[in-house]
Image (cartoon, helix red, strand yellow):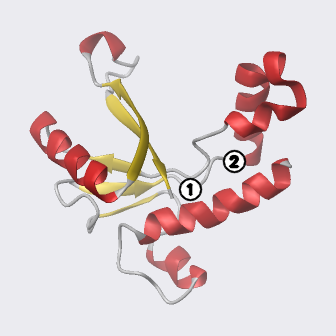
Amino acid sequence: DFESLLTAAQRAQAVLLMTFIDAPKNFQELDRRWPIGTKHSCARAAPSAAFAYNPGPKSKQAACKKAQVQFGPSEGPRRFMHLLDLARLSLVFKDSSMLRTGLEHILDRFEVVQVRNHYQPQMQGLLGERWVEVLVVL
């Protein structure tokens, strides 16, 4: 059910963050050391990153909207099973060579399910941002 999925996403978010910094004693210490909306310069799972940013897990409202719009018409009540980005972390690299090195570290450290390349010029967003999305198993 959706509520259980959101609870699992909270735990997955904590596990994801703890792979990039020294493990805190508990979740409260994790929240204190790396609160939502802040960046951390010590990204040990991707040492070539300039910093890592914690956007927090996807909100319930955003998850509901995404599931309904993208998967609701075909899946109906099973639409939530397709949400793969509930636990999230952003790594920022200063250039493409550092990004490549970072991707190699991630591929070595995690079980990677999918890599989505939005770094190409034709994939550039309205604000000029480019990114590579990597889906991993935690």
Given residues 70 and 35, the one toward you in this image is 70
Q: Which residue extends farthest right?
A: 77
Q: Position of residue 5 (x, y in %)?
A: 75, 53
Which residue, given by chain and number where applicable, does mark 1 sit on? 56
Image marks 1 and 2: residues in contact by CB distance under 8 Å: yes
**Residue beneath the point at 34% across and 26% down:** 117
Q: Which residue is mark 2?
A: 59
Residue, x 42% and y 81% (percent of image)? Answer: 23
Percent coordinates x, y for residue 21 in the rendering? 35, 73
Q: Quadrant of residue 66?
A: top right
**How many numbered callouts?**
2
Q: Nearer the viewer, residue 87 or 94?
A: 87
Q: Could you tell me which residue is drawn at 34 percent across and 33 percent down?
A: 132
Per the rendering, the mark at residue 78 is none
Identified at 39% across, 55% down, the residue is 53
Q: Return the x and y of residue 30 as percentages of the image width and height.
A: 51, 77
* Mark 2 element type: loop
103 is higher (above) or lower (below) than 33:
above
Give the side of residue 123 with respect to residue 10, left or right: left
